[in-house]
Image (cartoon, grey):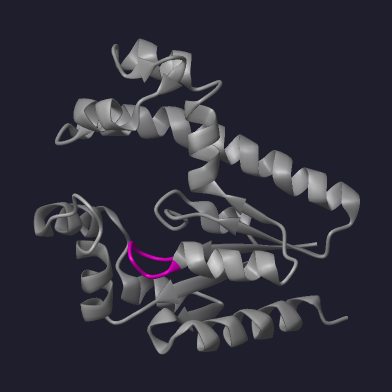
Protein backbone atom coordinates (compact mmCIF):
# COMPACT_ATOMS: atom_id res chain seq x y z
CA UNK A 1 0.00 0.00 0.00
CA UNK A 2 1.17 3.51 -0.81
CA UNK A 3 0.50 6.28 1.71
CA UNK A 4 0.30 9.58 -0.13
CA UNK A 5 0.59 12.82 1.82
CA UNK A 6 -1.26 15.91 0.57
CA UNK A 7 -0.23 19.33 1.80
CA UNK A 8 -0.08 22.96 0.79
CA UNK A 9 -0.08 26.38 2.34
CA UNK A 10 -3.29 28.17 3.28
CA UNK A 11 -5.49 29.07 0.32
CA UNK A 12 -3.78 26.74 -2.14
CA UNK A 13 -6.81 24.48 -2.74
CA UNK A 14 -5.86 21.50 -0.62
CA UNK A 15 -9.37 20.57 0.54
CA UNK A 16 -10.78 20.71 -3.00
CA UNK A 17 -7.89 18.59 -4.26
CA UNK A 18 -8.41 16.05 -1.45
CA UNK A 19 -12.06 15.73 -2.55
CA UNK A 20 -10.85 15.02 -6.10
CA UNK A 21 -8.71 12.15 -4.81
CA UNK A 22 -11.74 10.80 -2.93
CA UNK A 23 -13.83 11.06 -6.12
CA UNK A 24 -11.16 8.91 -7.83
CA UNK A 25 -11.79 6.21 -5.20
CA UNK A 26 -8.80 6.97 -2.95
CA UNK A 27 -9.64 6.74 0.78
CA UNK A 28 -8.80 10.11 2.37
CA UNK A 29 -7.95 10.89 5.99
CA UNK A 30 -8.67 14.59 6.56
CA UNK A 31 -6.70 16.01 9.50
CA UNK A 32 -9.04 19.01 9.86
CA UNK A 33 -12.07 16.69 10.02
CA UNK A 34 -10.23 14.56 12.60
CA UNK A 35 -9.69 17.67 14.75
CA UNK A 36 -13.43 18.46 14.55
CA UNK A 37 -14.28 14.89 15.65
CA UNK A 38 -11.74 15.04 18.48
CA UNK A 39 -13.04 18.45 19.64
CA UNK A 40 -16.54 16.92 19.85
CA UNK A 41 -15.24 13.84 21.66
CA UNK A 42 -12.12 12.63 23.42
CA UNK A 43 -10.19 15.92 23.22
CA UNK A 44 -12.94 18.08 24.74
CA UNK A 45 -12.33 17.33 28.44
CA UNK A 46 -8.56 17.70 28.05
CA UNK A 47 -8.91 21.00 26.16
CA UNK A 48 -11.32 22.27 28.84
CA UNK A 49 -8.79 21.39 31.54
CA UNK A 50 -6.05 23.24 29.65
CA UNK A 51 -8.26 26.19 28.60
CA UNK A 52 -11.21 26.52 31.04
CA UNK A 53 -14.40 27.86 29.48
CA UNK A 54 -13.67 26.66 25.94
CA UNK A 55 -16.04 23.67 25.97
CA UNK A 56 -19.79 24.17 25.49
CA UNK A 57 -22.27 21.27 25.63
CA UNK A 58 -19.45 18.72 25.66
CA UNK A 59 -17.65 20.03 22.58
CA UNK A 60 -14.84 22.52 22.09
CA UNK A 61 -16.16 25.91 20.98
CA UNK A 62 -13.63 26.93 18.32
CA UNK A 63 -14.35 30.65 18.73
CA UNK A 64 -13.66 30.50 22.47
CA UNK A 65 -10.58 28.34 21.90
CA UNK A 66 -9.23 30.80 19.32
CA UNK A 67 -9.65 33.64 21.82
CA UNK A 68 -7.77 31.56 24.42
CA UNK A 69 -4.73 30.96 22.19
CA UNK A 70 -4.55 33.85 19.71
CA UNK A 71 -1.43 35.94 20.23
CA UNK A 72 -0.21 33.53 22.92
CA UNK A 73 2.55 31.34 21.44
CA UNK A 74 2.88 29.21 24.60
CA UNK A 75 -0.87 28.51 24.70
CA UNK A 76 -0.91 27.65 21.00
CA UNK A 77 2.06 25.31 21.44
CA UNK A 78 0.33 23.60 24.39
CA UNK A 79 -2.78 23.07 22.25
CA UNK A 80 -0.75 21.71 19.33
CA UNK A 81 1.20 19.40 21.66
CA UNK A 82 -2.15 18.01 22.80
CA UNK A 83 -3.99 17.76 19.47
CA UNK A 84 -1.27 16.76 16.97
CA UNK A 85 -0.55 13.36 18.63
CA UNK A 86 -4.31 12.63 18.78
CA UNK A 87 -4.70 13.40 15.06
CA UNK A 88 -1.63 11.31 14.29
CA UNK A 89 -3.10 8.31 16.19
CA UNK A 90 -6.38 8.76 14.30
CA UNK A 91 -4.48 8.75 10.97
CA UNK A 92 -2.42 5.73 12.04
CA UNK A 93 -5.64 3.79 12.76
CA UNK A 94 -6.96 4.81 9.32
CA UNK A 95 -3.78 3.60 7.58
CA UNK A 96 -3.68 0.33 9.56
CA UNK A 97 -7.33 -0.35 8.74
CA UNK A 98 -6.73 0.14 5.00
CA UNK A 99 -3.52 -1.87 5.10
CA UNK A 100 -5.53 -4.79 6.54
CA UNK A 101 -8.11 -4.38 3.76
CA UNK A 102 -5.40 -4.42 1.09
CA UNK A 103 -6.21 -0.93 -0.17
CA UNK A 104 -3.55 -0.01 -2.78
CA UNK A 105 -3.45 3.76 -2.12
CA UNK A 106 -4.61 6.06 0.68
CA UNK A 107 -4.26 9.80 1.09
CA UNK A 108 -3.42 11.66 4.30
CA UNK A 109 -4.55 15.29 4.00
CA UNK A 110 -2.09 16.98 6.39
CA UNK A 111 -2.10 20.81 6.32
CA UNK A 112 1.14 21.05 8.35
CA UNK A 113 2.87 17.97 6.89
CA UNK A 114 6.38 19.46 6.76
CA UNK A 115 5.92 21.56 9.88
CA UNK A 116 5.06 18.48 12.00
CA UNK A 117 7.54 15.98 10.52
CA UNK A 118 4.73 14.22 8.66
CA UNK A 119 6.91 13.49 5.64
CA UNK A 120 8.28 10.52 7.62
CA UNK A 121 4.79 8.96 7.75
CA UNK A 122 4.10 8.96 4.00
CA UNK A 123 5.64 7.30 0.94
CA UNK A 124 5.02 10.14 -1.52
CA UNK A 125 4.03 13.80 -1.19
CA UNK A 126 1.66 15.95 -3.27
CA UNK A 127 1.92 19.70 -2.80
CA UNK A 128 -0.86 21.97 -4.04
CA UNK A 129 0.29 25.41 -5.03
CA UNK A 130 -0.81 28.63 -6.73
CA UNK A 131 0.86 31.99 -7.38
CA UNK A 132 1.02 34.22 -4.28
CA UNK A 133 -1.49 36.73 -5.71
CA UNK A 134 -4.06 33.95 -6.22
CA UNK A 135 -3.40 32.56 -2.73
CA UNK A 136 -3.73 36.02 -1.16
CA UNK A 137 -7.01 36.72 -2.97
CA UNK A 138 -8.47 33.35 -1.90
CA UNK A 139 -7.44 33.73 1.73
CA UNK A 140 -8.51 37.36 2.14
CA UNK A 141 -11.97 36.51 0.75
CA UNK A 142 -12.58 34.27 3.79
CA UNK A 143 -14.85 35.67 6.51
CA UNK A 144 -12.90 37.32 9.32
CA UNK A 145 -9.54 37.07 7.55
CA UNK A 146 -7.23 40.07 7.65
CA UNK A 147 -3.81 40.86 6.16
CA UNK A 148 -2.34 40.50 9.68
CA UNK A 149 -3.89 37.05 10.26
CA UNK A 150 -2.79 35.92 6.79
CA UNK A 151 0.79 37.11 7.43
CA UNK A 152 0.84 35.37 10.84
CA UNK A 153 -0.35 32.09 9.31
CA UNK A 154 2.23 32.24 6.50
CA UNK A 155 4.98 32.96 9.02
CA UNK A 156 4.22 29.65 10.80
CA UNK A 157 4.18 27.61 7.57
CA UNK A 158 7.08 26.24 5.55
CA UNK A 159 7.33 28.53 2.48
CA UNK A 160 5.55 27.33 -0.66
CA UNK A 161 8.81 27.26 -2.63
CA UNK A 162 10.36 24.89 -0.06
CA UNK A 163 7.25 22.66 -0.08
CA UNK A 164 7.39 22.40 -3.88
CA UNK A 165 11.09 21.53 -3.72
CA UNK A 166 10.36 18.64 -1.35
CA UNK A 167 7.31 17.32 -3.25
CA UNK A 168 7.07 14.19 -5.38
CA UNK A 169 4.08 15.70 -7.23
CA UNK A 170 2.91 19.31 -7.62
CA UNK A 171 -0.60 20.43 -8.54
CA UNK A 172 -1.01 24.09 -9.54
CA UNK A 173 -4.60 24.83 -8.57
CA UNK A 174 -4.57 28.23 -10.30
CA UNK A 175 -4.88 26.40 -13.65
CA UNK A 176 -8.50 25.52 -12.86
CA UNK A 177 -10.55 22.55 -11.65
CA UNK A 178 -10.26 20.56 -14.88
CA UNK A 179 -6.44 20.74 -14.88
CA UNK A 180 -6.32 19.84 -11.17
CA UNK A 181 -8.61 16.84 -11.75
CA UNK A 182 -6.42 15.62 -14.62
CA UNK A 183 -3.34 15.97 -12.41
CA UNK A 184 -5.05 13.97 -9.63
CA UNK A 185 -6.02 11.22 -12.10
CA UNK A 186 -2.47 11.11 -13.44
CA UNK A 187 -1.01 10.75 -9.93
CA UNK A 188 -3.52 8.02 -8.98
CA UNK A 189 -2.72 6.22 -12.23
CA UNK A 190 1.02 6.39 -11.66
CA UNK A 191 0.77 5.13 -8.10
CA UNK A 192 -1.73 2.32 -8.70
CA UNK A 193 -0.34 0.98 -12.00
CA UNK A 194 0.85 -2.56 -11.43
Q: Characterize the magenta stretch by its predominant secondary structure.
A: loop
Q: Is residue 30 above or below residue 191?
A: above
Instruction: Report if residue 74 is visible in the image.
Output: no
Q: In which quarter of the image is the N terminus?
A: bottom right
Residue 145 is inside the magenta segment = no
Please report the residue visible at 37 percent of the width from the left and 17 percent of the height from the top.
55
Viewer-proximal residue among 115 and 22: 22
Q: Nearer the viewer, residue 54 or 115?
A: 54
Compared to residue 16, the image places residue 179 above or below, namely below
The percent coordinates of residue 71 (x first, y second) are 14, 36
Relative horizontal placement of residue 192, taking residue 147 as reference (left or right): right
Residue 80 visible, this angle: yes
| Image location of residue 2, percent across then percent down | 74, 64
How far across and down, in percent of the image, does residue 150 sit?
A: 19, 58
Residue interval drawn in magenta: 8-13
Q: Where is residue 70 in the image (x, y as percent from the top left)?
A: 19, 35
What residue is drawn where x is 48% and y is 46%? Answer: 32
Residue drawn at the location 33% of the way across and 61% of the way down: 10
Relative to 46, say whether 31 is above or below: below
Amino acid sequence: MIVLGLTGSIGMGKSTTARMFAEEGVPVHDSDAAVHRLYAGEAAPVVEKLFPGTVVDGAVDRTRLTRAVVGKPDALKALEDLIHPMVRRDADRFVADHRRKGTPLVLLDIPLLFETGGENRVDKIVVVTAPHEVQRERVLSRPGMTEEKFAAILKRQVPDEEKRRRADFIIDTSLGMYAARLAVRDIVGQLTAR
